[in-house]
């Protein structure tokens, strides 16, 4: 009883800060997704989806369903998307990543990338279908497929960066 070591407040604060990295980074990606860049791109990669997928596999306790829901609500609020639409899509992505987590952990990156390719395609189709139902019209598929293709292309770069963060900052969380 007398030999118990209690973590200091600084240590606990450090753990909280480190543990907030996946959410904070994903929130930053939400902001980057909605800030006008002046480039004029109509379609951009799904940075938020990439982040949710990665962290749901590698640190699911730091990217849990309530945080994913909150990220979706924030995205909807900032973009004017129907409330809950992005949350629904991100929660589906999160759920799939969680259920298939064992397939990806400890395997070659190519397997994770291939898994993302499959999951992101399903999520892209789901988001297109929901958008069509919401608008009661058959919307063009090209913007959704363009965003999907761009997301697949940039996924390795983001996964590499997230992996570096995980190894250097989140090692002890």
Image: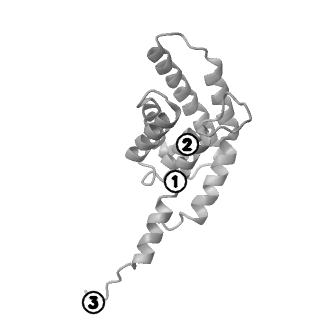
Q: Residues within 10 Å of mark 1 (few under 14, many from 20)?
A: some
**Disc 2 marks which residue?**
30
Residue 109 badge: none
Identify the mark nearer the N-term, 2 or 3: 3
CA gap between label 1 and label 3 equals 38 Å
Identify the mark nearer the N-term, 1 or 3: 3
**Disc 3 marks which residue?**
2
Q: Nearer the viewer, residue 142 or 39?
A: 39
Identify the mark nearer the N-term, 1 or 2: 1
Q: Nearer the viewer, residue 73 or 151?
A: 73
CA gap between label 2 and label 3 equals 47 Å
Whether the residues at callouts 1 and 3 have beta carbons within 8 Å, the answer is no
Q: Nearer the viewer, residue 30 or 133?
A: 30
Across and down, in percent, residue 7 comes to: 38, 78
Residue 24 badge: 1
Across and down, in percent, residue 129 comes to: 49, 18
Across and down, in percent, residue 78 comes to: 51, 37
Residue 140 picture quarter: top right
Q: Residue furthest bottom?
A: 2
Could you tell me which residue is drawn at 42 percent across and 47 percent down?
Answer: 67
Q: Quadrant of the N terminus?
A: bottom left
CA gap between label 1 and label 2 equals 10 Å
Q: Residues within 10 Å of mark 2 (few under 14, many from 20)?
A: many
Give the structural element (helix, strand or loop) at label 2.
helix
Could you tell me which residue is drawn at 61 percent across and 17 percent down?
Answer: 141
Q: Residue furthest right?
A: 39
Q: Residues within 10 Å of mark 3 (few under 14, many from 20)?
A: few
Residue 124 picture quarter: top right
Residue 32 picture quarter: top right
């Amino acid at each position: 009883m007398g030999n118990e070591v209690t973590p200091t407040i600084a240590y606990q604060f450090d753990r909280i800060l480190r543990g907030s990295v996946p959410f904070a980074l994903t929130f930053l990606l939400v902001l980057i997704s909605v800030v006008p860049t002046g480039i004029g791109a109509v379609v951009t990669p799904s940075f938020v989806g990439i982040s949710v997928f990665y962290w749901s596999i590698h640190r699911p306790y730091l990217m849990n369903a309530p945080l994913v829901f909150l990220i979706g609500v924030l995205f909807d609020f900032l973009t004017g998307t129907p409330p809950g639409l992005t949350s629904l899509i991100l929660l589906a992505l999160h759920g799939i990543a969680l259920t298939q987590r064992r397939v990806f952990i400890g395997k070659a990156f190519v397997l994770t990338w291939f898994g993302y390719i499959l999951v992101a395609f399903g999520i892209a189709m789901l988001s297109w279908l929901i958008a069509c139902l919401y608008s009661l019209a058959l919307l063009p598929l090209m913007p959704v497929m363009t965003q999907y293709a761009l997301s697949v292309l940039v996924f390795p770069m983001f996964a590499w960066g997230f992996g570096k963060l995980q190894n250097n900052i989140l090692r002890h969380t």
